[in-house]
Amino acid sequence: MPTYTPATKDMDFVLHDLLKVSEQDIPGYDELDRDMTRAVIEEAGKLSANVLAPLNKSGDEEGCVLENGVVRTPAGFKDAYDQMRAGGWMGLDADPEYGGQGMPYLMNCATGEMFVSANMAFNMYQGLTHGAYSAIHVHGSEAQRATYLPNMVEGRWSGTMNLTEPHCGTDLGLIRTKAEPQDDGTYRITGQKIWISAGEHDLSENIIHLVLAKIPGGPEGTKGISLFIVPKFLVNEDGSLGVRNTVTCGGLESKMGIHGNATCVMNHDGAVGYLVGEAHKGMRAMFTMMNEARIGVGLQGFAQAAVAYENALGFARERLQGRDVTGVRNPDGPADPIIVHPDVRRNLMDQKSFVEGGRAFLYWGAMMIDRAHRSKDPAAEGLISLLTPVIKGFLTDKGFETTVLAQQTLGGSGFTREWGLEQFVRDARITMIYEGTNGIQALDLVGRKLGTDGGKHTMAFFGMIKDWCKQNAGDPAFDAAFVEPLKTASKQLQQAGTFFMQAGMKDPNAALSGSYDFLHMMGHVCLGLMWGRMARAAQDALDAGATDRAFYETKIATGRYYMARQLPMVSTHLARIESGAEPVMALDAANF
């Protein structure tokens, strides 16, 4: 049976030693002292470990069931959902005007990590609600916010995104769902949406669907898309629930993983819908949901890796197999624990260095979101926009890879259901696909984000790394282990960007063929920066006389591993990019 113990000590290190959250000039951050953040994290950790984690395996095995149009979630999910509601976790960072606690988004990410590691499928119900809440909060009318948000913040009502259709996914300009305007100002929504997470379930009293559709006569393509609120139950003027709307679940997908979450086919048969924002301007509102969702999916990638690593480490410490080649370590037993073997150490160090680096990267990104929104900082807005596809794409690619490494640590046991690692692998796999496949994230990064605002935010990113390297140079040991490797990797990343500009002018495929490699290059550089910063923070703590020297020394050693064994992958990706489009595009379609 798999276990889950929240990494509260490392979370505390990232928040306070690395990010120094309470010292930031972001509104609300002055309240994030160690006592406050520890209290929140400890309570969320208890809920995660004691309530959500025990339901993860059973929820996977039982799955969701559709009966007479109603989806029944696995046993225990409703009670867990009610406990989440009672604790106010669904409105942790929501607007106090609508019943939220108003905490920074960073704290939502920190608690969200634990909820996802404990039970990813369960957490998706509230995760989708948060995205729908955000879209209505930003783009909805005052009346819409007053009607829907208090109940969504409380968790009485949940939310979804209805985007994909059977014939189109990423190319939303091809959607066929139509919205016919009515005399009373409402619209009648007709069409089918697929792969709708949490589309129908028995956890909340109402489900607020946000649906993309086209108003007849509007512009072609994405310029003609509008966004609509389509509630499962219509809401009366006094706020009570009215009649059932004509939006129904037509089926559940049979999936590889996340069995505890209902992934639905949703049929809109002339359902009553309410326009959000302006007609034909739905893409802007949709991206409020999508960008938040992409950060959340990046979190899912590393959070599944984190719980998988925890279980792999526990197994490696206890499993007896073979003898240490340098000398017997367990003389009273028939063999030594497998953690003594170099290849198992390599496997575990790959996992540990990614999980801890990924945590720092995601929390740093969440702090940028808070700075952008709370401080109205355009530089932070530009930087997090640049890094969003990297957070989503890199953390989920490497997160899945890490769950596989964890499974490998267990050998044959990792292939059985009893130990739970195969579930982490299956659940993590979807993160590379939904909310825009990672290939789409790479195209977004190279085709759009690098050149946004004349490349200003990209140059600011490189400038930030250059400044850090200058500020932290001078210690020969630190330079060799952290500064020089990061400086080299940053220059190689810039070299790849230069190649795109030069070769891409002649042949766009030269840039697009290397976009996936560029995303991974940038991901490694970001984690290299995080490890450099964490190593410096750890060394500062040691110099200040920290009592837990082992923790900080371990942090530095793990950072050295990443810089020596993972960051050099940047040069491999550069070589692939500079090979150009010819190797990728050489075959005619008929010759595959």
Image (cartoon, rainbow, N blue to C red):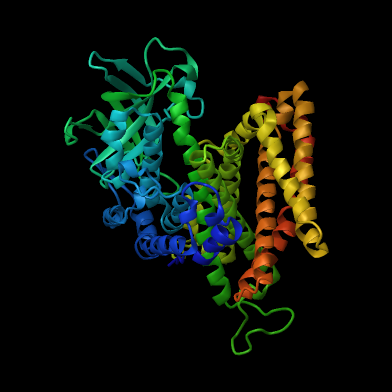
**Residue 24, visible in the rendered structure:** yes
The single residue placed furthest to the top in the displayed view is 217
Expressed as whole percent of the image width and height from the top left, the position of residue 320 reads 58, 78
Expressed as whole percent of the image width and height from the top left, the position of residue 140 reads 36, 29
- The C terminus - image quarter: top right
How many numbered tags mark residues here?
Answer: 0
The reply, left or right, for residue 114 in relation to residue 324 is left
Residue at the image position 60 percent from the left and 90 percent from the top: 332
Q: Nearer the viewer, residue 442 or 286?
A: 286
Residue at the image position 73 percent from the left and 42 percent from the top: 463
Expressed as whole percent of the image width and height from the top left, the position of residue 54 reads 36, 63
The reply, left or right, for residue 3 in relation to residue 205 is right
**Residue 512, visible in the rendered structure:** no
- Residue 252 is drawn in which quadrant? top left
Residue at the image position 68 percent from the left and 27 percent from the top: 454
The reply, left or right, for residue 286 in relation to residue 235 is right
Whether 369 is drawn above or below 306: the answer is above
Q: Nearer the viewer, residue 516 or 362?
A: 362
Expressed as whole percent of the image width and height from the top left, the position of residue 502 reads 79, 27
Q: Nearer the viewer, residue 173 or 130?
A: 130
The single residue placed furthest to the bottom in the displayed view is 332
- The N terminus - image quarter: bottom left
Residue at the image position 75 percent from the left and 34 percent from the top: 497
